[in-house]
Amino acid sequence: MSKQVKIGIDLGGTRIKIGLVDKKGKVFLRREVDTPSSSSRSVIIDTIVKNLEATIKDAGLKKKDVACIGIGVPGPVDSRRGIVHYFPNIKGWNNVPLKAILERRLRIRVSLDNDVNAMALAEYTFGAGKGARNLVCLTLGTGVGGGIIINGKVYRGSTMLAGEIGHIPLNEKGPRCNCRGIACLERYIGNRYILKRARKSFGRNITLESLSGLARKGNKRAEAIWLDVAKKLSVALTAVINLLNPDMIIIGGGVSKAGDLILRPLRKELKVRPMKGQALHVKIARAKLGGDAGIIGASLLA
Ligand SMILES: [Zn+2]
């Protein structure tokens, strides 16, 4: 193997995943470690460097065999300059020139992007979005993230901050969001808000898995919560579909494990809410690449 090798790194709030990815988008060697918690950013950077070097060694390679490394990170970045603006769930990262830092330490070229953009690129190239030209990728989890592909390329916007579907407002008034917006989609269907609602409805703590389980057994209260999640999502996605006229919307992330409990009512709503031409064309699909999407997408940045 010569300068063909691409490495993708998926820096998450809880795990750091590193993988060697082949031309067909298969991860053929991987390493996964916990993201050091509540520590300084230099500890996280050290962890990335150490494990990356170990991965290269595991593969029987030398650094000079690696053409480029891509890294997807959980927050807004300036991908052109390789700067992390901040991470909503990891403290101490403000305007960090991560690309330059890693390149200096590793002496390998590094590309950097937001993790949802990386995932969108992966699904577009090897996953549910194969064959589409324009698509929108959505992750439902603690946050609600979005990535946009237009004509086969990630659409980043003027200051690299496009795609924030989670912060589309659903109403004129409503709860204040962390982003400073009012009544943002994420403020209703981010996982902690679903859990809060479930706790209120059932009078006890309940996990998303059991909420899904109950709904599948026909529990009316659980069904109502998932139906509401789908409806709220359909309102925001109607805006997205009318604005962008995409071929496809791909939905991933932890909350999307509820599967048809969300997708069935969502598809129904999205047949009738957007304008007819757009609604007839758009397909709603579940993400296909699962936990590997971040690594694969990051390798495609490389
Ligand atoms: Zn917001």
Image (cartoon, rainbow, N blue to C red):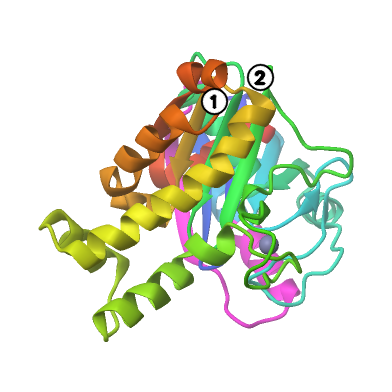
Residue 211 at what x, y percent from top left?
Answer: 25, 66
Q: Nearer the viewer, residue 67 or 35?
A: 35
Q: Nearer the viewer, residue 107 or 182?
A: 182
Q: Residue furthest bottom?
A: 203
Contact, mark 1 vs mark 2 (Cβ under 8 Å): yes
Spatial separation of the CA atoms under disc 1 and disc 2: 8 Å
Residue 66 in sight: no
Mark toward the start of the polypeptide (1 vs 2): 1
Circle 1 — which element?
helix
Up the image or down, 189 lies above or below 285; here it is below
Name the residue that disc number 1 marks: 124
Image quarter (top left, top right, bottom left or bottom right) of the C terminus = top right
Q: Nearer the viewer, residue 113 or 173?
A: 173
Q: Residue at x 82, y 43 (%)?
A: 160
Is 84 left, or right, of 61 in this rendering? Answer: right
Query: Is 45 colored magenta in this rendering?
Result: yes
Circle 2 — which element?
loop
Answer with the quadrant where ligand 1 appears in the image. bottom right
Residue 152 badge = 2
- Read off the magenta span: 22-51
Q: Residues within 10 Å of mark 1 (few under 14, many from 20)?
A: many
